[in-house]
Image (cartoon, rainbow, N blue to C red):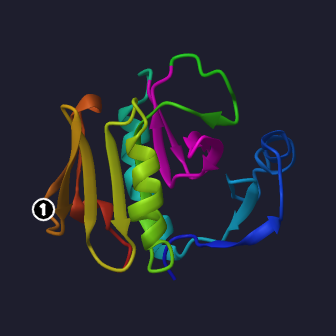
Amino acid sequence: MGAPVIIEPVKTEWTEAEYLADVGLDPQVRYEYLRGKVYAMSTPSAAHAEISSNFFAPLHQHLRGKPCRPYLGNMALKINFLGNPAYYIPDVMVACDDKPAHTNHREEPLVLMEIMSPSTASIDQREKRVAYTALPSLWHYLIVNSLKKEVFHYSRSGQGWTEIILTVPEEGIRIPELDFSLTVGELYEQSGL
């Protein structure tokens, strides 16, 4: 149960071009690419699907007709990871690049959300947090617990980042750059938590 987990690489070594040509565009399976390896992601749990939908649906409606676009676990994010290209598939991403250079991935997100489970906690809280918060375009990184009502909200503040932990259903998750907010209770609605 919980968020998708990275399983064994599907091939030992891939080039970035092979990833983009062979698996990066496959709409049926979610793959991430890191350090020359391609990792298939497991199928999300029901709670994971509810939580991501609860964030995406109102965000999608709110951003209709505006330049920013939300993506629900189906758009790759290209980043530079230790000097090498890497592609992650965030659970929800908002990108505001007016004319993206690529149709199969984005490079300048404003908001990223990952839904964590015990098997993905260290990746989401360490590896991805370090990589994501190094992106100049990113203003909000949300790590959402799939086992209890708990949201780690990292937001850009001046030259650094602030972290708040939200656990009360009435607390708001606020994205002022998009004039958007959602309560913790709304995020977890019908998730069984």
The crowd level at tag 1 (other Cα within 10 Å; few <14, some 14-19, many 20+) is few
**173 to the left or right of 52:** left
Image point (44%, 27%), residue name:
68
The residue lying toward the viewer, choosing from 85 and 150, is: 85
The residue lying toward the viewer, choosing from 6 and 74, is: 6
- Name the residue at the top extreme: 99
Q: Quick check: is 5 in the magenta stretch?
A: no
Q: Report the residue marked by disc 1.
A: 170
Residue 154 in view, yes or no: yes
Number of dots carrying numbers: 1
| Residue 160 coordinates in the image, percent (x, y) | 22, 39
Residue 113 in view, yes or no: no
Where residue 107 sits, quadrant-wise, is top right
Q: Quick check: is 84 in the magenta stretch?
A: yes
Query: From the image, which quarter does the C terminus lie in?
Result: bottom left
Query: What's drawn in magenta, residue-wise?
Result: 68-97
Type of secondary structure dominating the magenta stretch: strand
- Name the residue at the front extreme: 83
Q: Amino acid at mark 1?
A: Glu
Q: Is residue 1 above or below residue 85?
A: below
Image point (26%, 54%), residue name:
153
The residue lying toward the viewer, choosing from 190 and 106, is: 106
The residue lying toward the viewer, choosing from 9 and 58, is: 9
Assign a secondary structure to mark 1: loop
Image point (52%, 83%), residue name:
1
Where residue 156 sits, quadrant-wise, is top left
| Residue 147 coordinates in the image, percent (x, y) | 36, 80
Q: Is residue 188 above or below residue 181?
A: below
Where residue 104 sits, quadrant-wise, is top right
| Residue 142 coordinates in the image, percent (x, y) | 34, 54
